[in-house]
Amino acid sequence: MLKPGDTIGILGGGQLARMMALAAAPLGLKCHIFAPEGDNPAFDVAAARTIASYEDVAALETFARSVSVVTYEFENVPARTAEILSALVEVLPNPRALETTQDRYIEKSFIRDLGLAVPDFVPVDSLESLTAAVAQLGRPSVLKTRRFGYDGKGQAMIKSETDLADAWSVIGQSPAILEQFIPFEREVSVVAARNTVGAVVTYDVAENRHTHHILAETTLPAHISAETERAAKEAASRIGAALAYVGVFAVEFFVVGSGENEQLLVNEIAPRVHNSGHWTLGGAETSQFEQHIRAIASWPLGSAKRLGRIEMRNLIGADSDQWLDFVTEPGLHVHLYGKAENRAGRKMGHLTRVLP
Ligand code: AMP
């Protein structure tokens, strides 16, 4: 169990690491950020920093010896990095969560084997197997690289007119899965935390709207039945237990059908704090960031109670230029990530309104 004054190591220097470090401070815990050269907004708010590549063994070993536990803000932590660190210090969530979620085929198979519904999927490793997969699943369908896809990158829609050789080139001829296209009613997610003694808390289900594959808005409560809300939380608890997970994670779902026929399909698991949980800063009794720190410190989890109706909006690219208007609005929770460069499509901050 960590004690106030101890130091948490975080791999990654972006906004998620920044918000984790900000949440650790009131609990008396320090953070040491390990990230490669670049725009690392977490450095501004951390007690210590290491600038090195994730392959730098000497730097990883020194880092591991300087902290009480290591966590991460992104799922693409190289397996070798996790292995080097694990030999010297506890890495939480455990590296099994990384192995399972880094590869869409392994991830979807794991979820299906738990008895949870997922869109039909088939592995693809060549143009021939893509052709066979499309014959099996039909069109439209979605081709996704097994690894390193995020925010819609590494994906190609297979429509009626799509040439399969083109689609195969679009995703770089990388190992992939073909997935059934789901004409969903809405997209929702559950953010959950699980601690070292297996206690689980789940936040209420969030409804997410994407623009150009990037999360634009999250609102709560989600427009789903009480039964679907319960099923989503139950699915998250099962996934957490099956991974012996410690920390915060998110499960994203497609909602299909309505009324009696409303049903959830799991889209993916994020083994980290998640953008659809940013509303918990100000909108819940304990933020997802504090919850993650509590979990990996082996502390009791906090209350996930929601404090009102929620509207969270991401500030993408030039949206954040309006910062003076935002800080002028009474009661608005404004979070600006302090990134040095404002590029189109880049997450620069977020706003949360908590409504009665
Ligand atoms: P992903 O990277 O798998 O989360 O996909 C990014 C976004 O693409 C999702 O949030 C959906 O909006 C859309 N998408 C992904 N897979 C499917 C699917 N099988 N059917 C319909 N839309 C999808």
Image (tube, grey):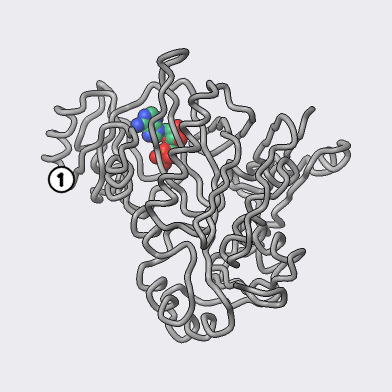
Residue at the image point whose x is 52% and y is 86% from the top: 62
- Quadrant containing ligand 1: top left
Where disc 1 sits, the SS reads loop
Please say if 35 is above or below 73: below
Residue at the image point whose x is 45% and y is 73% from the top: 54
Is 52 placed left or right of 94 in the picture? Answer: right
Image coordinates of residue 130 in percent, x first then y, are 17, 38
The part of the image, by quadrant, that contains residue 226 is top right
Image coordinates of residue 314 in percent, x first then y, are 65, 40
The part of the image, by quadrant, that contains residue 8 is bottom right
Is 77 placed left or right of 329 in the picture? Answer: left
Residue 345 showing in the rendered view: no
Mark 1 Cβ inside 8 Å of ligand 1: no
- In this view, the residue in front, 230 or 16, is 230
Residue at the image point whose x is 45% and y is 15% from the top: 258
Q: Quadrant of the N terminus?
A: bottom right
Which residue is the site of mark 1?
A: 126
Please say if 140 is above or below 329: above
Please say if 103 is above or below 70: above
Is 77 placed left or right of 70 in the picture? Answer: left
Image coordinates of residue 244 in percent, x first then y, are 42, 58
The residue sitting at the top extreme is: 259
Q: Quadrant of the C terminus?
A: top right
- In this view, the residue in front, 145 or 99, is 99
Residue 113 showing in the rendered view: yes
Give the residue type that dot 1 points to.
Answer: Ser
